[in-house]
Image (spheres, helix red, strand yellow):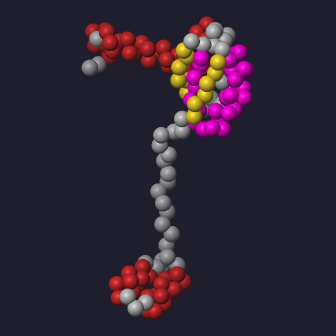
Amino acid sequence: MTFDNLGRTPVLRELVAKANTHRKAEEQVIASLPPALAPGTRFVCCLEGELTLSAESAGKASQIRFRQHEIMEKLRENELFRFVWKLKVKVAPPRFNEKPPAKKMPLSKENAQLLREEAGHTKDKKLREVLEKLASHVRD
């Protein structure tokens, strides 16, 4: 399936048209938001005069609700949103948080010595072996 074949499949063509309409509406809504609130805010839908947005955090959602009259006034200048009378904001946190990989701290000589001492006082042979092995991972 390529974009050249879109004209032959009416269902797909309709979906692409709806997606383009949604994208254009979202651009207009985001442009009407104060610049500090635009990043992380998405347009969800506008049905029967009720505009629904999603924000990435509860704090941002509260700020949008606080400034809703200003936002709706600016939106009503646009023909598409002329009859908007209510604004709903939902919180939708980002799906994935990319965390940096855990940084392993090297074992200090002092901690290695403490592990060796503890291994010397331990009666359990297997535990002693594990503690001694841990102590051998000292940084140079």
> Residue drawn 63% across and 9% down?
83
Task: Please state the extent of the stretch shown in magenta in the rendering.
Answer: 50-75
Q: Is residue 63 visible?
A: yes
Which part of the image, by quadrant, shows the N terminus? Answer: top left
Q: Main secondary structure of the magenta part?
A: helix
Q: From what the image shows, is residue 105 above or below residue 91? A: below
Q: Does the magenta portion include 53?
A: yes
Q: Position of residue 121 (x, y in %)?
A: 46, 92
Residue closest to the eye, 59 or 32? 59
Q: Position of residue 23 (x, y in %)?
A: 50, 19
Locate residue 137 relative to residue 56 in the image: left or right: left
> Residue drawn 50% across and 87% down?
113
In the picture as drawn, the residue positioned furthest to the top comes out as 79
Q: From what the image shows, is residue 58 above or below residue 47? A: below
> Residue drawn 44% across and 14% down?
18
Q: Position of residue 11 (x, y in %)?
A: 32, 12
Q: From what the image shows, is residue 53 above or below residue 111? A: above
Q: Position of residue 131 (x, y in %)?
A: 42, 82
Residue closest to the eye, 2 or 18? 18
In which quarter of the view is residue 56 placed? top right
**How many callouts does the rendering have?**
0
Q: Is residue 31 visible?
A: no
